[in-house]
Amino acid sequence: MVVLARKDTKIPAVSITAAFSGGLIVENKNTNGISNFTARMLLKGTRTRNENDIKGAVENLGGEINSFSGFNSFGLNLTVMKGDIDFALGLIKDMVANSIFPQEEIDKEKMLTYAM
């Protein structure tokens, strides 16, 4: 995993990206889409926070959180005001270290994938 941070003094915000090796470059016929699935599931909750807790906390701070997957990586992006960086780092840490994949969310993601 790589955590990226970039300083930009023009705006009082901080963006954190937790990126993992993966994506289309490592997928094959049997694992096609697994990076996208995993990225989306990272937003579904941790041992101590559900999806609504995560999204609500970030939105209450005026921030934004999303997942991504691409050719050679997948992961999370989180942007908050610079005064909330400790919260943001703790949240990213929790989502990476304590992520859960609730069965009902897995089933929903499968349905979305098959619908496409």
Image (cartoon, rainbow, N blue to C red):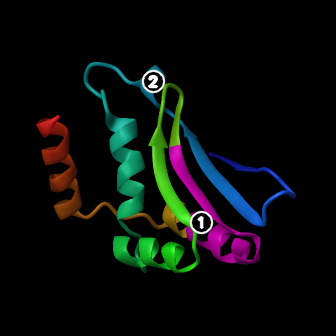
The residue depicted at 87 percent of the width and 58 percent of the height is 9
In the displayed structure, 57 sits above or below 15; it is: below
Q: Position of residue 27 (x, y in %)?
A: 38, 24
Answer with left or right where residue 17 lies relative to residue 53.
right
Spatial CA span between label 1 and label 2: 24 Å
Residue beneath label 2, please?
A: 26
* Residue 91 colored in magenta in the image: yes
> In the drawing, does residue 3 fall left or right of residue 18?
right
Tag 2's secondary structure? helix
Q: Is 7 situated above or below 32?
A: below
Compared across the picture, whether 4 is left or right of 101 comes to right
- Check disc 1 and report the residue beneath it: 93
Name the foreground residue: 102 vs 74.
74
Query: Residue 55's image quarter?
Result: bottom left
Q: Amino acid at mark 1?
A: Lys
Badge 1 element: helix
Q: Callout 2 environment at 10 Å: few (<14), some (14 to 19), or many (20+)?
A: some
Q: Magenta residues?
A: 75-93
